[in-house]
Amino acid sequence: MRIEDSLEGLRAALAGPRRVGFVPTMGNLHEGHLSLVREARRQAGADGLVVASVFVNRLQFGPNEDFDKYPRTFERDAALLRETGCDLLFAPDETVMYPEPQAFHVVPDPSLASILEGEVRPGHFDGVCTVVMKLFAMVRPEFAVFGRKDYQQLMLIRRMAQQFALPVRIVAHDTVREADGLALSSRNGYLSATERSEAPSLNRVLRAVVDTVRAARARGTITHEALAQAEQAAMAELAARGWKPDYLTVRRQRDLHTPATAELEGGEPLVALGAARLGTPRLLDNIEI
Ligand code: PAF
């Protein structure tokens, strides 16, 4: 695996007509990231070039989120990527990514970027879209792989690629879970042993809401009131178990807005999304319905 930290080095490594598949990351890698790299290899083929980036993007951190404390585990990340069959690791520092203050930003559609995660973390998705746009311009991949765990991020990146007619195909990859259902996340590393045993509850209460919706849809008895009750019961259960839930809600898959009654009753694809703090770490999960 070749490692490049400059734009010139990256361009030299990208020279030639190979199919480029790209996995952007902020490092601190786990099996979830590695599954994205394997998917990139599967789609790029043996002759393709699988590129990953490691860059902790200051622009997507809020003033109260600890950018400086984000774990930097470069040697380990590089070793894992090498073992997983990544061909090229692009690891720019801030002087390469932001040689001068980034004055041009991607401002994503607020109807998608200011709800849910965007409401809790104002400006977060501007930072994500800006760095992803810049990474796409640098790496010029044919396709890029993102995890479904960050559901809203994936949707925004898809919309950005579509609206700017970017020549990149966005590939979604399923969430990787521990045996007890906990979605893999860099933040799981911050959980104490007690919190770790509690952490699968987020997935469990989300599944309970999903089961309620499925059963009520099958019986033809689904209502907004019943849905709101299921969502509130799930939030209350998490709170009683020591979590601080930000949201736990069922939305339309297509735009993450609340389904209309006819959509709730009909076959509109839905998704249950949850975010809650357990001690210090804030965990996210979602299940499509
Ligand atoms: O999902 C992430 O790790 C980051 O948001 C991304 C897409 C690498 C942009 O910094």
Image: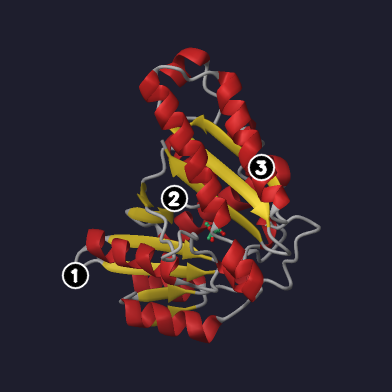
- Tell me, yes or no, if residue 107 can be seen here: no
Residue 88 on image: x %, y %: 37, 75
Q: Does the residue labelled 3 lie within 8 Å of ligand 1?
A: no
Tell me the residue at 42%/70% (across/down).
31
Eye-nearest disc, 1 or 2: 2
Tell me the residue at 20%/64% (across/down).
45
Asked whether 213 or 268 is in front, the reply is 213
Quarter holding the C terminus is top left
Asked whether 265 or 28 is in front, the reply is 265
Tell me the residue at 40%/17% (across/down).
220
Q: How far apart are marks 3 and 2 (CA)?
A: 22 Å
What residue is pinned by disc 2?
A: 148
Q: Earlier in the sequence, mark 1 or mark 2?
A: 1
Eye-nearest disc, 3 or 2: 3
Q: Could you say whether the residue bearing mark 3 is in a helix, strand or loop?
A: helix
Which quadrant of the view contains residue 234? top right
Tell me the residue at 51%/50% (across/down).
204
In the image, taking residue 47 as reference, residue 144 lies left or right, namely right
Q: Which of marks 3 and 2 is nearer the N terminus?
A: 2
Q: For residue 178, which numbered disc appears in the image? A: none
Amino acid identity at mark 1: Ala
- Tell me, yes or no, if residue 149 can be seen here: yes
Label 2 CA crowd tier, 10 Å (few <14, some 14–19, many 20+): many
What residue is pinned by disc 1?
A: 46
Amino acid identity at mark 3: Met
Mark 3 touching mark 2, by CB under 8 A?
no
What residue is pinned by disc 3?
A: 235
